[in-house]
Amino acid sequence: MDAITGATALLGQFLTPVPDAVVTLSDGRIAAAGPSSSVQIPPTASVFDASGMTLVPGFIDCHVHIGFYDPRSLLVNGVTTARDLAWPPHLIWPLVESSRAPESGPLLLAAGQMLTAPGGYPMRAAWAPRATGRVVASPGDAKQAVAEQADRGASVIKVALNPDVGPTLGRSTLEAIVAAARERGLGVTGHVAGIDELVKALDAGMDELAHMLMGSDAIPTELIERMVSQEMAVVPTLSVLNGAGLRKAVANLEAFLGAGGKVVYGTDLGNSGPRPGIDRREVTEMERAGMTPRDIVAAATRDAARHLGLHDRGVIAEGMVADLVALDREQLERARDLVRVGAVWRQGISARGGPGRN
């Protein structure tokens, strides 16, 4: 058994700050968590002194393209679970399989290929290897396209609705994709640009925006309210944006949050901008949109885990998977404090840090 002592830990479903906490780990799970006065440390336990640190659940990045990086570079920088949102089948599924080993990097979930219209994004995108996208030519092809991803192990279906770089899926085809995904118990996320495509996504019943709306459009209040009422989640990926597009995305995110919208952390790692791990620019732009450091932690841990259906992780509580990050800050006062990663555990195995704090 291992024990982490001395930290201020954000415990339980409410991420309650508990000073001088003790968290014990056994067989990849959290055995106990609470104030030092209430948790006994077995005499044979290996103890990590986290005094002066804040212990949080491992971060979950809900939007990566993992093939551009060594997965371990995410893990050692605080991301213990990641979801890949478009990569060729022959490349992504072996990575998903190997991610079951906690030393390999974060636990990986994946969408498989991005479903798109003939000639649509990302078929000619410079960043995308061949077979990153899968053309869906008609409503009749939707069920087969979804089945191909689901049969390989997809945790979500991703679609492209970006008219700025090519044709987009028609309404009937998109609706057929969503229906086929529902039959397989899967949600649908999307790369969506522009108000018209957002309306199409809402009409079809999509579950998530894989970016805050791409482009420089302000989302009207009535659409913000509709997104919230339909429980559409947003993965902001603000760190890939610049200039007017970034300013508008931050304003849209602020309005969405103000209306009670669900936000989960994601960076679009693999695109220009984000760095592996907890990304400084992403969290500081989320802060600009009105989120506190604890709000951001919630979006990247508890809320992300719930959104992805990972009910055994995302909070520090007895019985949960021991995915943990110790931050080199006793109090989280600003978003930038979240990138001060001092130690990381995945399934109770140390990926960074230790008694000597490397």
Image: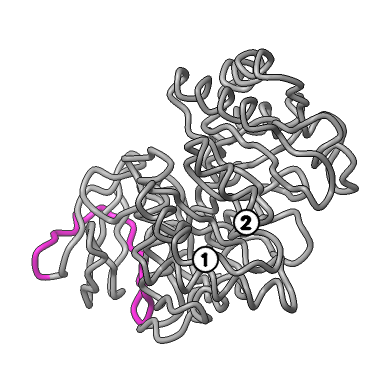
* Residue 206 image position (x, y, % from top left): 51, 39
- The answer to whether 210 is drawn above or below residue 57 in the figure is above
**Secondary structure state at the residue bearing disc 1:** loop
Residue count near mark 2 (Cα–Cα under 10 Å), binned few <14, some 14–19, many ≥20: some
Q: Residue at x 55, y 65 (%)?
A: 219
Q: Nearer the viewer, residue 249 or 9?
A: 249
Magenta stretch containing residue 180, yes or no?
no
**Is most of the magenta stretch helix, strand or loop?**
loop
Residue count near mark 1 (Cα–Cα under 10 Å), binned few <14, some 14–19, many ≥20: few
Q: Nearer the viewer, residue 60 or 272?
A: 272
Tag 1–tag 2 contact (CB < 8 Å): yes
**Residue at the disc numbered 2:** 195
* Residue 69 image position (x, y, % from top left): 74, 50
Q: Residue at x 10, y 70 (%)?
A: 37
**Quadrant position of residue 161:** top right
Q: Is residue 287 left or right of residue 55?
A: right
Q: Is residue 182 left or right of residue 8?
A: right
The boundaries of the magenta stretch are 37-55
Q: Amino acid at mark 2?
A: Ile
**Quadrant position of residue 212:** bottom right
The residue most toward the left is: 38
Q: Residue at x 28, y 56 (%)?
A: 316
Q: Amino acid at mark 1?
A: Pro
* Residue 22 image position (x, y, % from top left): 23, 65
**Residue at the disc numbered 1:** 220
How far apart are the alpha carbons under marks 1 and 2? Answer: 9 Å
